[in-house]
Amino acid sequence: MARTTCIPANQPGRAGDLEVVDAQHLRVRFPDTDAVFRDPSDALTLAGPATVAVTRAGDPLPCALASHTCAEEAGHLPLLACADDLFATDGTCGPTPHPTFPHFTALPFANDYQALCTTPSPPCSGLTPDFRFTVDTAGNLLLPMDWRGVLVNRDAVPVPRLLRGSTPLEAFPRSGTPVRIPNAAFLGSFTPEGRKLPPIFDPQADPTDPTAATFFGSADAPTSVLRIARRVAVPLCVEGTIADGPCTTGRDCPGGTCTPSFRACAGGSAPGQPCVAESDCGGGACGSASCVGGRRRGDLCRTDGDCAGGECGPSLFAFGDRALDGVGPVVLRRGACIGGVKALAACTDDRSCPGGQCGSFLARALDPVPLDGLVETPSTFVFVKEEAICPNGTEVACQGQDLNGDGDTTDHVVTVADRTTGLIQGIGVVGAEGRAEGRAVARIRQPPFSFPAVAAEGDMVAFLEPEPAQDNQDETHNGQVFETILRVFRLVAGSPPSVVELTSDRNPLTADASPIINGRSLIVSNDRVFFRAAEAAAARQRTERVSQVSLFSGVGPAISADGLSVAFTSGDVVFVYGRVSGVTEPVSVRTDGSTSGGSASPSISADGRFVA
């Protein structure tokens, strides 16, 4: 049973709803359906898989498309154009579904993250209780986002904002099992037009709330669409000499083919769950999947084509039956039922929601981090933050934040976090308020660019710390405070994770910050740190007084090239001090041996034998 609602186009104030570009092109603005779905002012619209069809003005409406595809109705309906299924851009013009967006999908209004998040304030306001998303034909979740309220711009350059959100939503209705995302491969960020964006978007495990699905990421674009995949296929060789080996193209599989294959965990802490790598299975193996449903239920499979009437492998979640009224978005509202027979009714716990659960979520806006300060490895996040950038996104009445415990807010500071939990591991000095979050890091300038002197691999992080920026301390005890010190830390996995320093404060290493090691100041490779150090910088420095106390203070010194003799002026007489003999003797003397006045600014030969 379907219903048709006609919305007049190009009404006053809404020009451009429908535009004939030329004889071959028609431009259509997707209609705002808020007025035809539930309350006309609740910002809830029709959402989910949709079909766009074009017919002649006098033809009957193509209502059959409510239950049939464009391909099925081709030749039966008077269609000028029809769009529903989206196909892979593989150059074949064949019916292979697009691997990311297999169907045209209507999105709900974008979620304003500034109004969703509650911490910190500002920029967060927490004024909106609703988080809206939709489900495509493959069961994947699409979450339209508006980040503009929490973005930071510094000198007209966007600075990514770190973000964290969590929710105890059930993976399947009435299952009591929370959504578990095993790998970042299941997550993606895209422009509204469908182009891939490269921000951080990671699943995390909050050790304080194991029942919640936690997400961590960054945003520097004004809007985007987040995608959470229900299943992910892994390209593997089928048959040939390296069967089941990883591949990118068919050339990687001699005698076989490279085929995207679904996988599932066997054993471990996540048996039967989708996976893309062994690490997703908590000690188990990521192996072959089996058919779910259909005539071949339980048979081993690689693709859905192996499972007539079913699909290959398990899925992470199912939200299709939680769409509002079956045609709207999925609405996660704080303190309201999601799913079940009382969707959006007020609730205090799951008992108030027959067939559903009581909705809740948390959203936070974390520190801004410049693009060149986002460093990541499979296990570790390294963030280089600017203390002077205001975390509330505005410069009004903001003094920045001291992140390295030296009492100022002018430094670039490196911080280390465990990628699985998101927990920051303090690596700074210990002060009255505990251990500082980070340590100062040198910035290398290659005009017009600059970048932090930091490198990471696996669980190892190395960076160069400038003495002036870390409390102006003489770390090497050589009488100078303008050197860069090598710091190396290793993240130790555990519950909770921890961090240990591999370098020593008792015997610090001075490093040359010049970017001449593959264009960088230092590199971490195969668990080793490569850096340069000048012998003179590492040598112990000593200050030696060469002018005698009984004389006037020495001025205008000149040292010989061999370093053995120092000439200087004391009063109006020039003296030479022999550093080996320890003898100071006047050299501006008359023929009778008495000193002569009016002498100054001496220069000395390379071997110290002549003074002028």
Image (cartoon, rainbow, N blue to C red):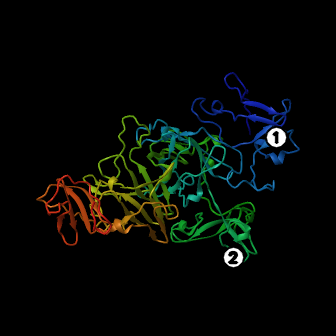
Which residue of the protein is positioned furthest toward the top in this rendering? 12
Left or right, 315 with reference to 126: right
Q: Which mark is residue 81?
A: 1
Asked whether 393 or 43 is in front, the reply is 393
Residue 424 vertical position relative to residue 63 in the rendered view, above or below: below
Mark found first going from the N terminus, 2 or 1: 1
Q: Which x, y percent locates residue 603?
A: 29, 59
Residue 144 in sight: no
Asked whether 473 or 299 is in front, the reply is 473
Residue 416 vertical position relative to residue 247 in the rendered view, above or below: above
Left or right, 397 with reference to 132: left
Q: Amino acid at mark 2?
A: Ile
Q: Residue at 70% across / 68% down in the picture?
A: 301
- Element carrying mark 2: loop
Residue 410 in sight: yes
Q: Residue at 69% across / 33% down in the picture?
A: 31
Residue to which mark 2 is pinned: 242
Quarter of the rendering occupied by the C terminus: bottom left
Q: Which x, y percent locates residue 462?
A: 42, 63
Q: Which mark is residue 602?
A: none
Question: Which tag is nearer the camera, tag 2 or tag 1?
Answer: 2
Q: Which x, y percent locates residue 376?
A: 50, 59
Quarter of the rendering occupied by the N terminus: top right
- Element carrying mark 1: strand
Q: Amino acid at mark 1?
A: Ala
* Quadrant assignment, res 313: bottom right
